[in-house]
Amino acid sequence: MHDVNQTAVLEFFLLGLTDDPELLFLTFYLFLSMYLVAVIGNLLIILAVSSDFHLHTPMYFFLSNLSFNDICLITCTVPNMLVNIGAQDQSISYTGCLSQVCSVLAFGSLESCLLAVMAYDHYVAICHPLRYTVIMNPQFCVLLVLLSLFISTLHALLHTLMALHLSFCTDLEIPHFFCELAQVIKLACSDSLLNSILVYLVGGLVGGIPLSGIIISYIHIVFSVLRMSSRGKYKAFSTCGSHLCVVSLFYGTGFGVYISSVVTDSPRRVAVVSVMYSVATQMLNPFIYTLRNRNIKKALRRLNYMLHSFLSCIVVLHSGFQNKSK
């Protein structure tokens, strides 16, 4: 197979989830719907938290950051897929592909770190309630988010810079709907052993350390909850329930993709399974947090009232200007 130097590679080809024209039509509208639901749902959480001073607490500060990250993560993959299906063009430029790899890695890692930070916040709130405001002060909360952003950016840049040194063959077809690092490495004709080692080693650290932090936090939480009264237990579980659901969904789908890649030899099937962690998780997170959180529901109702009042004022002003012009 003839090698092509990386500077000569102009574009890759994303094969997507299916070649069937009828299924492509269905896939387009399905992913468009999921994308709009994810963006609107997460945007509503951000607006609700920012507009209600009762929610200006560390817990909701981290939640709004998680929602913003979900918007960014799903925007890295789905819009490009929709454009390709609409234009019936499977190509993506070399620069665009590596940019997508970097973005997905950065926001995916940030998701993992933010979930660990939220677990620590719950741990402090339940195990050290009297010191909560002292420990989780605004400066420390911002520092935790910035540290998470730094780690995730460093992780993404490491893999992207390593991928820049790879040279590729004439076969540049990626059996996925976005440029996934593992699939890009498989296309390389040059030695990619170091890249593969880094994927498992650094990826394991970036994913495993936050997961370990989450598990340790909840072990302490469980022991603290067991010593509480029935009312305290209910309040603690209601606080942690939504977060546990999101953590289970994120890591569960991630492990599912890994297991499916080991069990099956079909990259297309792995791509279908990966929809769960790359699209469905971001869409479901707002529902999980709003359905189980009274404060978010109240804030959304206040936001709805504010928007309704604002639109009513615009309609009244518009009617007044029309009457004056007549």
Image (cartoon, rainbow, N blue to C red):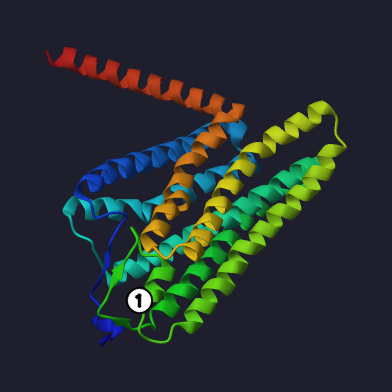
User: Number of marks in the image?
Assistant: 1
Q: Which residue is drawn at 43% across and 73% down?
A: 160
Q: Where is residue 172 in the image (x, y as percent from the top left)?
A: 28, 73
Dividing the picture into quarters, in which one does residue 165 lie?
bottom left
Check the image and report above or below for 92 versus 117.
below
Q: Position of residue 158 (x, y in %)?
A: 49, 75
Please indicate whether residue 89 sits to the left or right of residue 101 in the image: left
Please indicate whether residue 305 sits to the left or right of residue 144 in the image: left
* Identity of the residue furthest to the front in this view: 264
Q: Position of residue 257 (x, y in %)?
A: 49, 58
Q: Report helix, strand or loop for mark 1.
A: loop
Q: Residue at x 54, y 32 (%)?
A: 290
Check the image and report above or below for 271 versus 102.
above
Between residue 119 and residue 58, name the one nearer to us.
119
Q: Which quarter of the rendered picture does the N terminus lie within?
A: bottom left
Question: Mark 1 highlights which residue?
Answer: 187
Q: Position of residue 229 (x, y in %)?
A: 85, 29
Q: Which residue is drawn at 47% across and 63% down?
A: 261
* Identity of the residue furthest to the left in this view: 326
Q: Which amino acid does label 1 sit on?
A: Leu
Residue 137, visible in the rendered structure? no
